[in-house]
Image: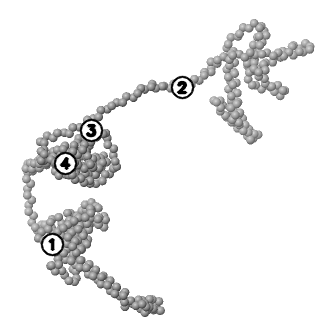
Amino acid sequence: MSDHTRSYCEGFFMETLINSDTEPDAALCFECVVTLEAFLQFKDQCHVNDEFLKTLPPKDSAEGSEAGEVEEDDEDAMECDYLEEDDNEDDGGGSRDSEEQGLVEELDHPSGSSPVKVIRKVVKVANKKSEVDPLRIPKVVRTQKRKTKPKSGPKKVVVVPKKPPQKIPDFSSPEPTEDNLPKLRDSYPNFFHFERGSRSLYYDLIYYGERFNSAIYNSLHTYWFCAWKKTLDCPAILYVSNDYTEFERRYEHTHGERPTKGEPELFTPQQALPTIFRICWNKVKERKVKQLEVTREKKERAQKQPAKPKPRPVARSKLKPVVLKKPVPKIPDFPGPQPTADELPKLKDSYPDFFYFERSHNTRFYDIVYYGERFNSPSFGSKNTYWYCAHRKKYKCPALLHTSNDYTKFERRYEHAHADQKPRKQVLLYTPKQALPDMFRICWHRVKKVVDKKLQMKSNEQLDDSSKDKTPQNELDFIEVVENDVEVESFDD
C-alpha cells in the first residue's frame, strides 16, 4: 500500500511515492522539495532555450571540418548541459559539467589496426553571450511619483468687518416726560452694568457676572430672565425695581459659566438707564392699551351674542341634601370644670373669607382650610395654635399654619412638598362663627390639661427631693428577702 504525497512550490506540483509498510518513518523535507522544484524549473528552461537556438541560422566558419565537429560537440554539450544520471553509474562514471571541465571527445579507430591508440582531445567551449529570451518578460514595478505641492505663499488674513449693533427701534407713541420717568442718580453700585452685542435688540443686564435678558416690564418692577432660559431651561430670575435701586435674585442657575459670543459693547448704568427707563415706560403703556382693547372686544362680543335665557328657579324640595356615606362623629365632651365666658376669646361679628372649617367621618375635631390648603392635627398653646398639613404623614410635608387663639392673625410657614390634592367630597362645611365656639372650648381644655400635668410633675419632683433628704443610712432595714420565692422587694417610706 502506498501513500501519495503531493507538494506545491512556486506554481509546480510534484508527486512523491511513499510506502507506509516498508517506510513507516519516512519524512519529507521542505528544503529538498524546494530544491527539486527549482531543478525541474531549470530543466524546462533549458529545453526552451534549446528550441530557440535551433531556430537561429548556422554560422559560417573557416576552420573546416574541425570547427564543424566542434559545433556539433557544442550542440551536444548544450543538449546535455543538465544533470542526468548515466546507466553506468555503478562502474565509476560520473556526471561532468561542460562549462567547468570542457567536453571530452573519444576518437576510436576502426578495428583491425594495431596497436590501438586512444586520443583524447579537450575542446574548449567559448562562452557565448546569452541572448535575450523573448519568452521572458521582465516585470516592471510601477510606482506612482510623489507629487510635490507647490509652495504656498504667505496666507492672506481676511478681515471680516464687525456687524454694527442693531439700532434700538423708535416707539410710535408720544415720548414720556421727565416726571413720568424715574430720576437718574449720580452714582450706582459696581455690581451691575449693561452690555449690548451685535444681535441684541435692547440691553443685557450683568448682575455679579450673571447675564440676564428678556425683561418683562411692569409699572413698579422689572423681571429679568436668565440669558440661557430657552437653551438650558434655566429658571433664574432677577427681580429689580424700576429705578434700579433694589435687586433680588430668585431661583438658582442650572448651569455653569457660559462663554459669550463676540465682544459686546459695555455700558455703565448712567449710560444705559435713560434708554431703559424710556423702553419700560413705552412697554407698560402698550400693555395697558392692549388690555383695554381686549376688554372692549369682550364687551362687543357679549353684546352681539344672544342673551341666554335665565335659569328657572328650582324648588327647594327638589334640591338633594348632602348624604354622607358614614356619619360624622360627635365632638367628645371634656369632663371636669367648664370654662367661663371671660376665660374664652370673644367671638367677632365677621371673619375673612379665606378660611373656614370642615369635618368628615374620620375627623375628631375640625380641619381648617386656609386659601384652599387643608391643615389638621392642631397643637394648642396658651396664645397660639399650630396647624399641620393634612398630608404630613403621606408626603412628609413640612407646611405649617401659625394662628392666634382668637383667629385674627395667620402666618403660613414653609412650603408644601406635594402638588394640589383633590378636595374631599363627603365633608360638612362650617363657617368660623359655627366652628370657633367649639374650637375655643377645645383649646381651653387642652391647655388646662397640659398645665395641670406640669404642676403635677413639679409637685412629684418636690416630693422626691424631700424624700431623698430623709433616707436612712442603713438601707438593709427596708429590704425584705423572701427565701421561698427568691425575690427582693423594696418599700417606700
* Rendered image quadrant of residue 129: top right
Q: What element carries label 3?
A: loop
Crowding near pointer 1: few (<14 within 10 Å), some, many (20+)? few
Q: Mark 2 points at which residue?
A: 143
Can you tell which mark lies on residue 185? 4
Does residue 411 show up?
yes
Q: Which of marks 2 and 4 is in front?
A: 4
| On screen, residue 26 above or below 310 | above
Q: Do the residues labelled 2 and 3 touch (CB within 8 Å)?
A: no
For marks 2 and 3, give the one nearer the viewer.
3
The residue shown at (31%, 32%) is 160
Please say if the residues under marks 3 and 4 sit with CB atoms less than 8 Å apart.
no
- The disc, 1 or 4, on the residue closer to the chain's N-terminal end is 4
Sequence-first tag of 2 and 4: 2
The amino acid on which the numbered mark 1 sits, given as a three-letter code, is Gln
**Residue 242 placed where, x, y %?**
19, 50
- Give the residue pinned by disc 3: 198
Inspect the image, locate mark 3, and give the three-letter code of the amino acid beneath it: Ser
